[in-house]
Amino acid sequence: MTGLNKWLRSIVLFLVCFTIAAYGWFILGGAKKEYIVTPKNSEYKIIDDSAQNGATTATLDIRKHGALLECNIVNKAKWPFCEIAISLTDSIEEGIDLSSYHSVGIDIDYTSPIEGERVRVYLRNFDSNYANVDDPVSLKFNAIEYSPGVDVGLQIFPLRTFQVLSWWIAENNISVEKSSRQFDNISIIEIATGSYVKESYYAIRLNRLVFYGDWISESILVKSLLLLWVVTAVILIIIERFILYNKMKNTEERSQRLRDANKLLYNKSLKFEHLACTDPLTRIRNRHSIDEWLEEITIQTRLNNLPFSMIFIDIDHFKTVNDTYGHSFGDEVLIKFAATVETLIRRSDVFARWGGEEFVIFCPETNMSAAVEIAEAIQASIANKAWNFDREFNLTCSFGIAELVDETCEDLIRRADLALLKAKKMGRNRIEITWEHQQLK
């Protein structure tokens, strides 16, 4: 996870820097935009009351950034007026979308006979739901009235302060949902004399007309940055889950490989343990396999006051067999001898090859008398068995028996070995026993 944490720190640092930079850019005005209306991108013309049989006369002087409208109002028409009409586009149907702008700045010097007289500013919006190309009055009137004065400079008005004229709503039978202000398709901007004028000289000098907006609003910027954080967090969580899943999968696969390897090693160890504890020729236990067991069983036997006997067996004249018939035949004798004895002992008895032609039987919970009976049965079976060897051969064995008393397992083995030695000295194919602390010679 160290690599992921390093990437995570880098990504968080980047997001923090990006967020600070983006919001700082917004605060410092980087997102602001302007749309300046000038004679270069618009068409200026005069509209007055002549269409209503009025007598007002007007002239329009186009300047570099604006225009000067001078008119002599004659009180002949019902509503005498004059205005500057600014067409933003060549087609009345295809205006300019000003809905992303929040304010309009207007710099007008207004000369009139009445101090503080107002001018009217209309932002005319075309919408096919209510407007008609052949009827200019059908374009929506988004309007404000204010007193510009002279040399006041640029005055800024939020677009939300514009109101739709009620007479236009009533005259065009506009539904409620279409009666609010609308700036998504402004075709014409009109700057007109006030609502109540006198016969006199009027002048409207338009010095500057500019719309202010933001390429992106503060709320959208904040939401976008928040969304960026959330999306990044989700992606990082998904990546972390994916990496964790792969790690868990790899760990599980590695664990499975280890389990398989351990199982293989365990099986091999069992095999090796079996080989280590089994005589490779006769396939019975070897001397090494019973050393620890013998020590434990003798201790338990003494503690529980139970009988325990040991039978030492030696195949008679086995060296002569090897010398006469060869070691291969000798091995065959050992194998068949061990297999035969194994069928004659009890399930509780422990039978092992002690070395060479010597074998041992340990008899738990067995006293001397019972051990002698076992030895006699083995002796008779071995002596009378038809061995089916490929040559004439008589097989007999000698026995030395000892019963455990208050002694160690080494002492027990030594006494049984002495009894076996006596049986061999006494002519072989016989059973000899040794009692407690008896010294056999």
Image (spheres, helix red, strand yellow):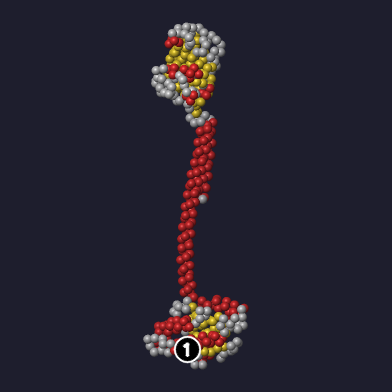
Which residue is situated farthest in the left direction here? 390
Residue drawn where x is 48% and y is 83% of the image: 344
Residue lying at 56% horizontally and 86% vertically, measured from the top left: 368
Find residue 377 and report its horizontal and vertical position in percent. 49, 87
The count of marks equals: 1
Of residues 124 and 291, the one drawn nearer to the viewer in this rendering: 124
Picture residue at 47% right of the left edge, 8% below the top: 77
Q: Report if residue 316 is visible in the image.
A: no
Identity, as a three-letter code, of the amino acid under mark 1: Ala
Between 61 and 166, the one lying in front of the other is 166
Image position of 217 with respect to 412: above or below: above
Residue 239 appearing in the image: yes
Residue drawn at x 51%, y 13% is 195
Q: Residues within 10 Å of mark 1 (few under 14, many from 20)?
A: few
Q: Residue 23 appears at what percent x and percent y?
A: 53, 34
Q: Position of residue 306 (x, y in %)?
A: 59, 81
> Element at badge 1?
helix
Q: Position of residue 348 (x, y in %)?
A: 52, 79
Q: Is residue 39 above or below residue 403?
A: above
Position of residue 358 relative to residue 220, above or below, is below
Location of residue 91 by image quarter: top left
Quarter placement of the C terminus? bottom right
Residue at mark 1: 380
Q: Residue furthest bottom?
A: 426
